[in-house]
Amino acid sequence: MSLHTPIQKAIGDKPFVLATDLDGTFLGGSAQSRETLYNLIEDNRDSVGLIFVTGRHPEFIQEHCDTYGIPMPDYVIADVGTTIARVHAPGIVLPDTQLEEPIAQAWQGKAGPVQALMEQINGLTLQDTPFRHRLSYHISPDGFDASEMEPIRALDVDVLISDNRFVDVLPKGVSKGPTLRRLIKVLGIPEDRILTAGDTLNDISMLTADLYAVAVGGSEVALYDALPESPKIHRARAIGAAGILEAIAAFDLHPTPGSY
């Protein structure tokens, strides 16, 4: 495998596009399954497009691709759907302010009032990460009461609690799913060529966006409970990257190796 093969063909022209969460999903599973999935992508850049849809920020993506040999995506939806970034040669991940304009408008004037109220809620610690159009918090092991979030929602924002560890405060109507759907429309990607993949409740809007979807093995129980029964949603047995490969084969979206 040649790491970071140049991305040349437009993503809208590729027969298959994987839109995947990172932690626990694309970065999850055994070393063998990750290598198999990453090789599939790198060896088939003309036929496989890659979009990272993550709670991480763009700088994290760039650093991890450079450091750990993770395939470089074509596009990045970061910060739980509140950042849209293009990947420029040679692997520079930069937010696209034009694509983000509706998100920025929806968040305008919200950060200060939200943070002031959030500081009054026990059991939350502001995450040490750059914030652009959202605020995110770690949940302490004890002392957090989710009912205290109602005054936050009254500020016309969305509150997402996932994995019993994280609280994200997002612009109203903005999350992974809506942002992904808007991006694929702009890029001209046919909906029947896309597989979405995730493992926690902050992936729910992406996995229920009426696209092919997989909840990989080992996903948060609350995600399984929230997912509807649908022929487009695959509940994988295999963990992380192997679960993605399992779903690619199940939906017959792209040829896959026989063992992973």
Image (spheres, grey):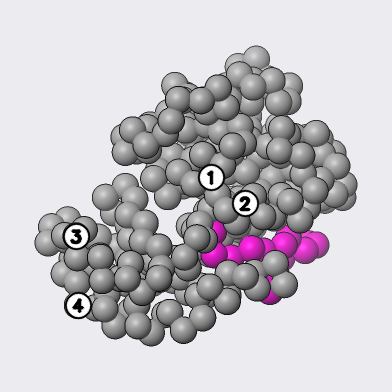
Disc 1 vs disc 3: which is toward the camera?
3
Identify which amino acid the numbered label 1 is placed on: Met
In this picture, which residue range is highlighted in magenta?
Answer: 81-97
Choose mark 4 or mark 3, whichever is in front: 3
Whether the magenta-drawn stretch holds residue 222 is answered as no
User: Considering depth in this image, is 163 or 69 the residue closer to the camera?
Assistant: 163
Q: Earlier in the sequence, mark 2 or mark 3?
A: 3
What kind of element bears circle 1? helix
Q: What amino acid is found at the position of numbered circle 4 in the picture?
A: Gln
Read off the residue under disc 3: 147
Q: Secondary structure at mark 3?
A: helix
What is the secondary structure assignment of the residue under circle 2?
helix
195 above or below 171?
above
In primary-sequence order, the first of circles 1 and 2 is 2
User: In the rendering, which numbered label is found on residue 206?
Assistant: 1
Q: Name the residue carrying label 2.
A: 180
The residues tagged by marks 2 and 4 sit, at their Cα atoms, a distance apart of: 33 Å
Q: Amino acid at mark 3?
A: Ser
Q: How many dots with numbers?
A: 4
Mark 1 touches mark 3? (CB < 8 Å) = no
Which residue appears at 55% of the width and 49% of the height?
177
**Crowding near the residue tagged with mark 1, few <14, some 14–19, many ≥20 C-alpha atoms within 10 Å:** many
- Residue 184 pos. (x, y %): 71, 49
